[in-house]
Every structure is written in structure tokens, then in C-alpha cells.
Amino acid sequence: MKRRLAALMATFAAGLVMVGGAGTAVAAPAGDATQVRIDAILDAHPGAVQTGRTRVTFSNGVVLGLTSAGESDCPADAMCLWDDQTYTGQIEIIYSYVCDYALTINLKDTGFNDRASSWKNNTTRRVGTTYWDYDARGGVVWRMYPMQKAPTLPKEFNDEASAVNCYNLS
Ligand SMILES: [Ca+2]
């Protein structure tokens, strides 16, 4: 019995080697690296769901875009942060319904801590606030008023935001 199990495991190991070998023999499409990252995010965040080829939606309603995105990728009625200046690089989309639940989005939870370098508030009546520290602590870094945007941030605010929340204008 023991011997059979060992043989079975050897077969299994051989199978793994074969899969790995096949993978390295073929040039990996560029998208594979993105999928590996998405899989890692899904593993680390129970409740997160892959909602597109390059998108993950977290249980708090935040959508993370894993590929480089432009200003036009920020949907209506959402607030967006980009990793790079002038609305480029990885995008983090915060849909406005997050504001209705008074949720604080900890950017660390979506792999976006200390990364935001440009932003756009594509809503008509939500005000977003970014904070220096986790759980909206440490004071306000900047505010995002409706229909405003910033292609760059002052040097002292760049790559600093750690949390975001928002409220509705009455
Ligand atoms: Ca950045």
C-alpha cells in the first residue's frame, strides 16, 4: 500500500514537471504575468472576484485594474487613482456607492498603498478624502471634489495616500 502511494506520488510529481516544462517551452503571452498577479491578489483577499481579464473587484466595492490605464478608463460616477502621473499606470477605481456606506478604503488592502500619483473625481456629488495612514488616520493628504482631477501631485503628497473615504454632497 505504501509503495503504491509512493508510485502515485512519483507519477504526480512527474506530471508537475511535465506541466512546468511545457510552460517554459512556450513563450508566455504578456497577459500571463497579469494573471499571476491577479491570482495572488485573489488568494490574499477572500471575497475578491476577478471581474475582467485585468480587473479584480474587492468585497468593499473597489475595483483594481492591473494593466496600464488612461484617463478615459475612469468610469462615470467613480473616483480613480493612478499609480503614475497624468492618469497612467495601474488604476484603482472606487465606485461612488462606496460613499453611501461610509466605508474607508485601505489602499494597502488592494496593493495600492503609497502609490497614488494622479487622480480624478468623475462623480457629480461625492467628495473623496485621502489620508496619510491606514484606517483614515494621520490626517488628510488631499481632497477630491466632484468633477475635479489632478494630473500630478505636489512632491510631498506623491506616493503617500494610504486610505480613502468619501461623503455625499447634500
Ligand atoms: Ca506612484
Image (spheres, grey):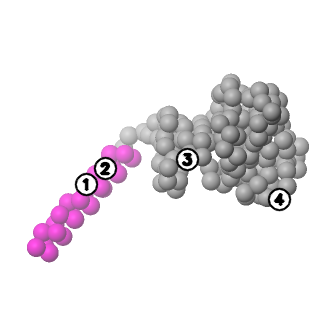
Residue 4 magenta: yes
Whole-angstrom CA distance, mark 2 to mark 4, is: 49 Å
Which mark lies nearer to you, 3 or 1? 3
> What's the magenta bit mostly, secondary-structure-wise?
helix
The residue at 80%/52% (across/down) is 131
Q: Nearer the viewer, residue 47 or 113?
A: 47
- Look at mark 3 in the image and give the residue it sits on: 59
- Quadrant assignment for the C terminus: top right
Which of the marked residues, 3 or 2, is nearer the chain's N terminus?
Answer: 2
Mark 3 vs 1, N-terminal side: 1
Toward the viewer: 93 or 16? 93
In this image, 121 relative to 91: left or right? right
Which of the 4 image quadrants contains residue 127? top right
Earlier in the chain: of badge 3 and badge 4, it is: 3
- Name the amino acid, label 3: Ser
Name the front one of labels 2 and 4: 4
Which residue is identified by label 1?
15
Q: Is the residue marked by circle 3 packed among few (<14), some (14-19), or many (20+) residues within 10 Å?
A: few
The label shown at residue 64 is: none
Mark 3: is the Cβ under 8 angstroms from ligand 1? Answer: no
User: Sequence order check: which comes first, mark 4 or mark 1?
Assistant: 1
